[in-house]
Image (spheres, grey):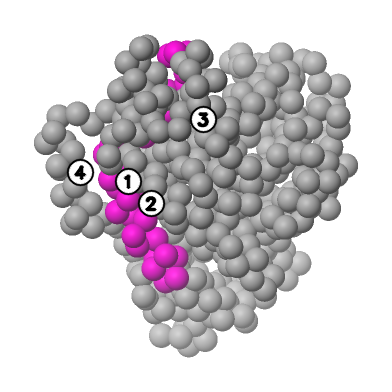
Amino acid sequence: MTASSSTRQQLALLGGEPCDIPASPQYPVFTELARKRVDEVLATGNSCGFSKIHPLIAEAENAVAAWQGTDYCLGTSSGHAALHACLIGLEITGGDEIVCTPYTWGASIASILHNNAVPVFADVDPETGLLDPASIEACITPRTRAIQAVHIYGQPANMTAIRAIADKHGLAVIEDGSQAHGARHAGRRVGSFGDAAGFSCNGVKLLATTESGYMVTNHDSVYRKAQLCTQHMGGNRRDIGRAGEEGFPSDLEPFLDSLVSTYRLTPLNAVLMTEQLKKVDEENAGRQANAQTLREELAGVKSVRMPDYPDGDEAVFYVVTLTFNPDHAGVSRDTYVAALVAEGLSASVYVREPIYRWKRLQRNSGAPRTMWDAMLAEREEAYGDIERPGVEFKSAYTFQLDFQTRYIEDPDAMKKIAAAFHKVEEQLPELQAYERANGR
Ligand SMILES: Cc1ncc(COP(=O)(O)O)c(C=O)c1O
């Protein structure tokens, strides 16, 4: 069935039959070899991630570094841990400021707060939700140490412009590539533009293990300091820390201890990382083809549009983000999304409010005490007082479709997804009447 041939059946939200949307396939799928290798690790009895000297951890870290095009990779227990390791490695702490995006998964910002640094929120492009380079310089103060860019939804941020601003002001650049393994800016994979980058490899990511992540960097010093502070050091036992690794600098030796954040990668996840990496490019290409089909099929749906990307930039579509046009639809975004969900689509609003308005970032919020309360108390400008127009628009007028499972060669599924949009689009008057009767 093509989108345009969808028959005029009653909307599922109004009691009609839902569309025929194929269920999302299982995700992630681990190869037989990956599962066999996990079994082998378990059979040895020791699956603790004490050291790069462990050959499976070394194998994963070397494979990721080669794929990312960076000199170093540090496997971690999560994406949050990887981002935190970036700050640790760069020694950004003690009230240092990081210019960042207010439109991301909270862990990007939590990694800043957890190192006693201060997020300073710039603005984003209203269509993509990516950090808007034009908004960065106004956020730079004498305390600024870095810019953190997030490649949200698998879209590459404008790293050329961000790097240029950072270089002009002598700042470090941190990338959060957790949703964007393999995305390209100016033809190059994200992750190597920054001084350090953190990636999540949790079980829904494009490079999915169970729970893990990695930090990549081209700076030996960042890698070593992150190792020092995020991996358990075994006292004077060099075999269970990372100090026994070739090249560990003698000037850091006196500081080896176990006053660390325990962010170790386990050999089990190391094996999964190595094996999943072998198929990530192919799966990304499948998603890109599907996203292109979806783009074409949605061309006639005036209530939504997909963002365009500059030449040389390649999104990898962890999620497809759509900008909603309420003037055309005549209903609220939430009513429109509810109609799509009733038809069987996995649609939702990923970020409803800019992070600077989240309750736990407000002074005296009544939330449980946190390590950033003192920082909030000191700040003259309360986060709740700021307003950035790009992110206000992005969080109010866009919604997202889950897409990470859509790497399979199934253009028919894209046509069926698009048919649900066409069905809703053809019955906007009915949806408007529903909204008038039921509220938003
Ligand atoms: C953009 C972004 N940053 C950081 C994270 C944190 O990753 P993890 O859940 O592995 O800690 C995630 C994942 O959930 C994410 O989407």
Q: What residue type is labelled 4?
A: Val
Secondary element type, mark 4: helix
Q: Which mark is residue 59?
A: 1
- Which one is earlier in the sequence, the residue at label 3 or at label 2? 2
**Disc 2 target residue:** 63
Q: Furthest residue to the left?
A: 43
Q: Residues within 10 Å of mark 2 (few under 14, many from 20)?
A: some
Task: Name the kind of residue labelled 3 in the image.
Answer: Arg
Instruction: Write the start and end of the magenta stretch as one range.
Output: 257-286
Provide residue 313's location: percent of width, then percent of height. Answer: 63, 67
Give the distance between the C-alpha atoms of the residues marked 4 and 1, in whole angstroms.
14 Å
Q: Which amino acid does label 1 sit on?
A: Glu
- The local crowd at label 3, few if under 14, some if 14 to 19, many if 20 or more residues have their Cα within 10 Å, is many
Give the CA separation, mark 2 to mark 1.
6 Å
Mark 1 or mark 3: whose residue is earlier in sequence: 1
Q: Residue under circle 3?
A: 224
Does residue 6 appear to the left or right of 145 in the view shown?
A: left
Q: Residues within 10 Å of mark 1 (few under 14, many from 20)?
A: some
Q: Nearer the N terminus, badge 4 or badge 2? A: 4
Is residue 115 at all visible to an observer of this figure? Answer: yes
Residue 38 tag number? 4
- Residue at 32% x, 15% y is 237
- At 40% from the left and 33% from the top, the residue drawn is 246
Give the distance between the C-alpha atoms of the residues marked 4 and 2, in whole angstroms.
17 Å
Mark 4 and 2 residues: CB-CB less than 8 Å, in contact?
Answer: no
For residue 226, above or below residue 176: above
Quarter of the rendering containing residue 268: top left
Residue 274 is a magenta residue: yes
Q: Main secondary structure of the magenta part?
A: helix
CA separation in Å, label 3 and label 4: 28 Å
